[in-house]
Image (spheres, rainbow, N blue to C red):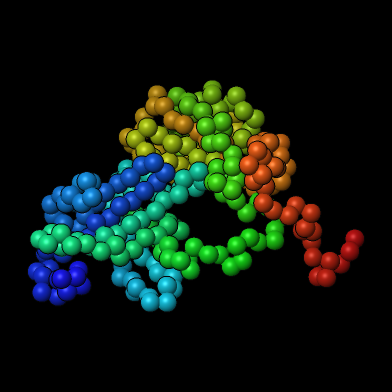
Amino acid sequence: MTYNDDVQPAELNDIVELFKLTIGQDIYFYTSSNQPVIFDSNTYLPKTIERTSFQISEKLQTKNVKLKAALEPETLSFLGVAAPYVATLQIIRIDKITLNSQFIFTGSLVSTQVKDKVVSLDFNSDTIIDKNTFPPMTYQSTCNNKLFDNTCGVDLSLFSIEAVITISGSVISSATFALESDGYYENGQVLATNGERRFVDKHVGTDLTLQIPFSAAILNGSTVTAFAGCDKLFTTCDTKFNNFRNATNTGFVGFPQIPTINPVINGIE
């Protein structure tokens, strides 16, 4: 008997969904069940999660799904997500009685929103068509890569550092940050030991201004890891990361000589 054969006669409470949320190396396992569910050697813990419906298209068209959950440290870690980390979602539907299961959604985080202490996470599906961008590369002066991805080729470990911080709202401070020139960590990210990650908007001296403050779990004296940021310019790739062309013949993928002013529209000076 197939999974779909079991869906109709099964009691509604026997059919539960499992949510596998991933950011970098951190993985969270939750379930819509009111009791823990063990699946594939992982324990999925009960959590109040609301998700929107979606349609599974035979043509593999883009599917979107939105999750809503209470504003907690785990969900906060999905806010301000940027390279070097990518957040993903996998939804599995399982019959607790027969243990028949079906993977019904796999996707990547595209946007986040907070309202009334509820976090909304929007994911796009990773179907075959979704994974193929048309065109795969854009003719643009800035780099097409994401910092630290396989095509970029920059070694993340060479551009990260641990620091003991003090906190004032969205600003974290450490003498360690001043070891690099102003702006070094802008467009980068800060990782706390509990898995919370924050995007860096500004870096001046000893101070990093975060897009979203850390939760109350991160205290003065906490240790974090800061990652360098990239503005995707050719000069940054060449001088900051020495990565215009690296040992694997990857690196900067852009067209820096493309004019930024359209001569047809703006004329020639």
Q: Is residue 80 above or below residue 172?
A: below
The picture quadrant where one finds residue 57 is bottom left
12 sits left or right of 173 in the view: left
Residue 104 or residue 120, whichever sits in front = 104
Point 63% across, 60% down: residue: 137
Rendered location of residue 36, percent (x, y): 15, 49
In the image: residue 259, left or right of residue 175: right
Q: Nearer the viewer, residue 241 or 180?
A: 241
- Of residue 188 and residue 174, the one placed in the foreground of this image is 188
From what the image shows, is residue 256 above or below residue 200? below
Residue 45 location (% of width, % of height): 20, 48
- Can residue 44 be seen in this snapshot? no
Q: Residue 88: x, y in percent?
A: 39, 53
The quarter in which the C terminus is drawn is bottom right
Residue drawn at x 15%, y 59% is 99
Q: Residue at x 73, y 55 (%)?
A: 255
